[in-house]
Image (cartoon, rainbow, N blue to C red):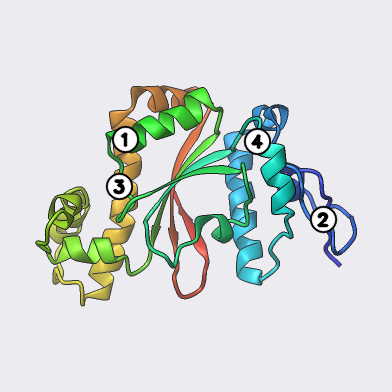
Amino acid sequence: MNLRLSVSFSALALAASCAGPQTQVSTVISQAEQQAMTPQQVVAMLQQGNERFVAGDTTARDYGAQVEASASGQYPMAAILSCVDSRVPVEEVFDIGIGDAFVARVAGNFENVDILGSMEFACKVSGSKVILVLGHSSCGAVKGAVDAVELGNITPMLANIEPAVAKVAARGGERSSKNKDFVAASVHENVLQTVADIRAQSPILKEMEDNGEIAIVGAIYDLETGKVEFLD
């Protein structure tokens, strides 16, 4: 039986340890644990968490105890930029708990100055080791950009996704939200574009990545399977 030690998320994710089958994780990441993590370890933890989610083997947590333990400070390991889609519950998808990650959400998972500032706070000020841009299959915001939807504030919002869609359109193929291949390619390109834009628009985060302090990575969540594919 695969059992886990109720000490910390880092210990939980990095090694399979033994405790009682009903043991709940009641602690949160400490400053010392966060500082000891490498970006590569954090990415591995997120990957392992998603594997547990897909397998239906998620971690039991004592949320009341985690609320109390995190009240005096937070030391999240990652900052995740996700779409607002209700079918992408970020903490559940990666099997993480209170205090494990900063999460920013906007339709189409693109960056702007507010999100960049939030990421700089997460990494430079609060010590997070990974920025993850998480897109997802069949993204409605991407479909809206593909079809050039015009509706209130949605229109200028979709303009943030248009550069990625235009790149896909330049390769050929029917530009339509009914074209599943075009939409999938646009979702993929939009994640890569956002990763590139974060590096280009935040000298602070770019320097941290160049120094090996953080990693900026992209991934796509499959709505049908629950699996997260990390992109190179």
Residue carrying label 4: 71
Disc 2 to disc 3, C-alpha distance: 36 Å
Q: Secondary structure at mark 1?
A: helix
Disc 1 to disc 4, C-alpha distance: 25 Å
Measured as percent of width and height from the top left, residue 45 is found at: 64, 48
The residue under label 3 is which amino acid type?
Phe
Vertical order, 108 against 177 (above or below): above
| Front tag of 2 and 4 | 4
Disc 3 to disc 1, C-alpha distance: 11 Å
Q: Secondary structure at mark 3?
A: loop
Residue carrying label 3: 110
Residue 4, labelled with which disc? 2
Residue 9 seen from this side: no
Residue carrying label 1: 114
Residue at 63% across, 30% down: 73
Residue 188: name its quadrant: bottom left
Image-based side of 84 in relation to 97, left or right: left
Within-10-Å neighbours for mark 1: few <14, some 14–19, many 20+: few
Residue at 33% across, 27% down: 202
Within-10-Å neighbours for mark 2: few <14, some 14–19, many 20+: many
The residue under label 4 is which amino acid type?
Ala
Measured as percent of width and height from the top left, residue 196 is found at: 31, 39
